[in-house]
Amino acid sequence: MSKGHRVRGGFSGFFFGLGIAILLQQFGVVALTLPIVLALPFAMVLVGVAIGWPRRRRAAPTIAA
Amino acid sequence: MSARGPGRRSPVATLARALTAVAMLAATMALVPDVAGAQVTGGCSATIDGQDANAAQSVRSAIAVDQKSTVIVRGTAPGPISSYKVYLTFAGIRFLAAEGTPSSNDNSYTATIKVSDYAKYGVGLYRVDGETTGTKCTGWGYVKVTGRFPLTTVAGVVGSLFALFGLLGMVLSFPSAASSGLEASPGQINKGVRS
């Protein structure tokens, strides 16, 4: 298994989601209500954890004799 | 031939999918009308900058105000009002923008809000709530503060930094190529040669 960075991914996802939520409010796309403030960072935490999840190691290449 | 197997997705492709999902989520939130919450109720009425607050309860119908302007919030109740409060809501937190006590037996109030006091921190969409006591009334509407580029405000800078460093952190969270199983140890190669 390759080494993952789930915690880093989760934290990064949270701040990315929060930043996007603030920017959407600033540009007048959405009002920054409590559900949006909670939902978008939380959704991005899940995305961040998924990105940082360890990947399965591939099978070693076989060299024909 | 590519080093990646047929079942593997590149990190860039995965991130692109994730960002597409976020964009779709944001678009969905923008399209869903915000109909929750109390509207002007019980024979009460309210105006923000001369426009009916009741008609400004969706993002598209928000009342546009310039960042240098002064907004006048007027409320009328079916009976005498003992006090009123006007709030601005940001990120689910209500900030008191104005409060007062109308003259006795008055069934209306007028509150003045200087937009520039708040526009230095941020522009965009805000919810304005009005409440009265005595004759209890509540009403709200959206205002859209314009006249300043969003990225030059405190909230805009903070949001940009969060988004930028968050994105950077997510990119760095991909398992590195060196540890992703692309290399094979000598033992594994020998095993492959023997078989």
Image (cartoon, coloured by chain):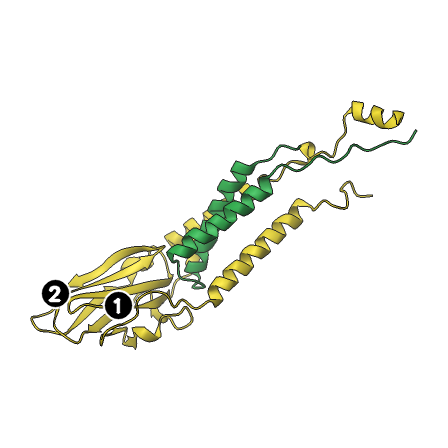
Chain colours: A green, B yellow
Q: Secondary structure at mark 2?
A: loop
Asked whether, in this view, residue B177 is left or right of residue A51, the answer is right
| Residue type at the position of mark 1 | Thr
Quadrant housing residue B112: bottom left
Q: Provide residue B83's location: percent of width, then percent of height.
A: 14, 64
> Which numbered marker is on residue B101?
2
Residue occupying image coordinates x 52% and y 37%:
A7
Q: Secondary structure at mark 1?
A: strand
Quadrant housing residue B76: bottom left
Quadrant housing residue B117: bottom left
Relative to B93, residue B58 above or below: below
Residue B22 visible: yes
Mark 1 or 2: the one toward you: 2
> Which numbered marker is on residue B70?
1
Return the residue found at the far front: B42
Residue occupying image coordinates x 47% and y 48%:
A42
Q: Give the class, few, some or many, for how many residues have Cα within 10 Å of label 2's Cα (few <14, many ≥20).
A: some
Instruction: Please state the chain letter of the residue tagged with numbered disc 1 in the rendered image.
Output: B
Q: Give the class, few, some or many, for how many residues have Cα within 10 Å of label 1's Cα (few <14, many ≥20).
A: some
Residue B167 visible: no
Relative to B148, residue A4 above or below: above
